Image (spheres, rainbow, N blue to C red):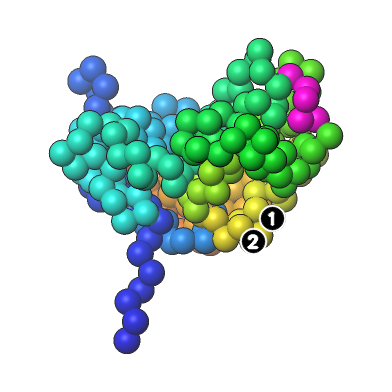
Amino acid sequence: MSALPQPAVRGVGLSQIFEGRTIYKNVSFEVARGQVYAILGGSGSGKSTLMKQAIGLLRPAAGRIEVLGRDMYGDRGAGEDDDVLREIGVMFQSGALFGSMSLLQNVMLPLEMYTDLPLAGREAVARTKLGLVGLADAADMNPAEVSGGMTKRAAIARALALDPPLLFLDEPSAGLDPITSAGLDRLILELRDTLGATFVVVTHELASILAIADRCLMLDSVAQGMIAEGDPRELRDSSTQPTVRAFFRREAMA
């Protein structure tokens, strides 16, 4: 019997504390390869904190997180495993593009840092990635010259630069109108299907969650931890947990 494929991300008993305040404790989950997995929760619940632990920016106060089969921390400091870092792509909430550089130059940055490709090769790869996200004609424009949706797409193109099997997207739809947001959701699914990549998406946008997520986990600041995990459509229809029901039904808590 063949072994089951190793999960793309596994968290075991994760906790985080800031200045004596517990953000969450004992969070465990697995992200299967090829999934779109969403991290949900209200403001202050620890969504982005959990992502920072997974991408090597924040050592957990307790627990272990494995990415692509490797312990992200172990005996090392945060973010010191370059082999893992080269296999993940990250899109931060604001896009985090350099305003003085063109979209093409922004996408070329990871290639300059992690490859020995000549300039022509780096440019060719970057133009290909921009083409994947529908920005081939905007390559020479600066971030200030494009819309918010185009900025998010360019940030995804940069995350794709090294062909990572695993991508983390922090609030990709934040601040976008419903039509642009729906287009970005469709892009994520197309990239998942075309590239076979795994996506971990931090979001509180209900429409996007139901449109793209195969599974999700939900954090809650009051409970200081994870209060639900599973198919978001099943959680919407069947959960008896009051906070989960309120979130998926857009209801105010009593």
Contact between labelled residues 1 and 2, with CB atoms less than 8 Å apart: yes
Helix, strand or loop at disc 1? helix
| Above or below, comparing residue 128 to residue 190 in the picture | above
Residue 180 in picture, x, y percent from top left: 77, 37
Return the mark for residue 193: 2
Task: Count how many numbered circles sit on residues in the image.
Answer: 2
Q: Amino acid at mark 1?
A: Glu
| Above or below, comparing residue 33 to residue 59 in the picture | below
Residue 49 left/right relative to 111 = left
Residue 209 in picture, x, y percent from top left: 59, 48
Circle 2 residues within 10 Å: few <14, some 14–19, many ≥20: few
- Would residue 229 be visible to someone looking at this image? yes
Residue 139 left/right relative to 158 = right
Q: Which residues are magenta?
A: 138-142
- Would residue 46 be visible to someone looking at this image? no
Return the mark for residue 190: 1
Tell me which corner region of the image, top left, top right, bottom left or bottom right, holds residue 224.
top left
Question: Is residue 140 within the magenta segment?
Answer: yes
The one nearer the camera, 14 or 42, is: 14
| Above or below, comparing residue 9 to residue 14 in the picture | below
| Type of secondary structure dominating the magenta stretch | loop
